[in-house]
Amino acid sequence: MSWRSVLNDLIETGDFRTQRELARAVEARTGRRINQASISRELQALAVRKVDGVYRIGPELDLASHVQSWTHTAGGCLVVFHTDLAFASVIAQNIDGAGLHGVLGTIAGDDTVFVAVSGPEAHTGLLGALGIEERRPSVG
């Protein structure tokens, strides 16, 4: 069993409050030492969140419901999303983690995400990754 599977099992069955506790539990079960950075990356990949101070695997976020509007500019090479307050970084992180073809990078504020893309052809994959139906963008 891989350490990632063990980590997933530990989160589903235990009450861990720190990444250090998780790393020690993984080591105890597998005999393999995993550093905190690896634990942190895997927690992010599993969409783990703290609930009442304890790590829990949560349901996937409905990102589309937190996007209020979007537009593109700069010849289709910049897509701008306006989000609910405090969701811009969550959305940018999901875009960055998706490894989408044509997405060059993101910049997020509190409620705005700028996404640099290689051209208009990258829009479909970008919108699909967020669960947004492709439609005409808002005028912005």
Image: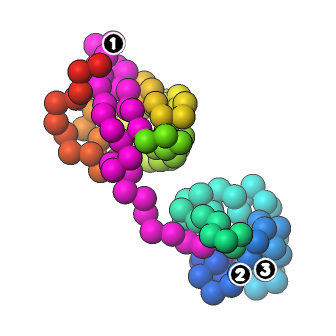
**SS category of the residue bearing label 2:** loop
Residue 68 percent location from the top left of the image: 33, 38
Q: State the scheme by which the image is colored.
A: rainbow
Around disc 1, counting alpha carbons within 10 Å, would you say few (fewer than 14), some (14 to 19), or many (20 or more)?
A: few
113 magenta-colored: no
Observer-nearest of 44 and 53 = 53
Kind of residue at badge 3: Ala
Left or right: 65 as drawn, with respect to 10: left
**Visible residue check, residue 118:** no
Whether the magenta-drawn stretch holds residue 70 is answered as yes
The C terminus lies in which quarter of the figure?
top left
Q: CA distance from mark 3 to mark 1?
A: 50 Å
- Label placed on residue 74: 1
Please tell me which residue is depicted at 78% across the width and 80% down the height of the picture. 25
Labelled disc at residue 25: 3
- Percent across and percent down for residue 77 are 34, 19
Residue placed under numbered mark 2 in the picture = 15
Q: Secondary structure at mark 3?
A: helix
Whether residue 44 is visible here, answered yes or no, is yes
Q: Specify start and end residues of the magenta stretch as a single range.
A: 56-83
Query: Mark 3, residues whose alpha carbon is within 10 Å: few (<14), some, or many (≥20)?
Result: some
- Label 1 secondary element: helix
| Front tag of 2 and 1 | 2
**What is the distance, in whole Å, between disc 2 and disc 1 at their CAs?**
48 Å
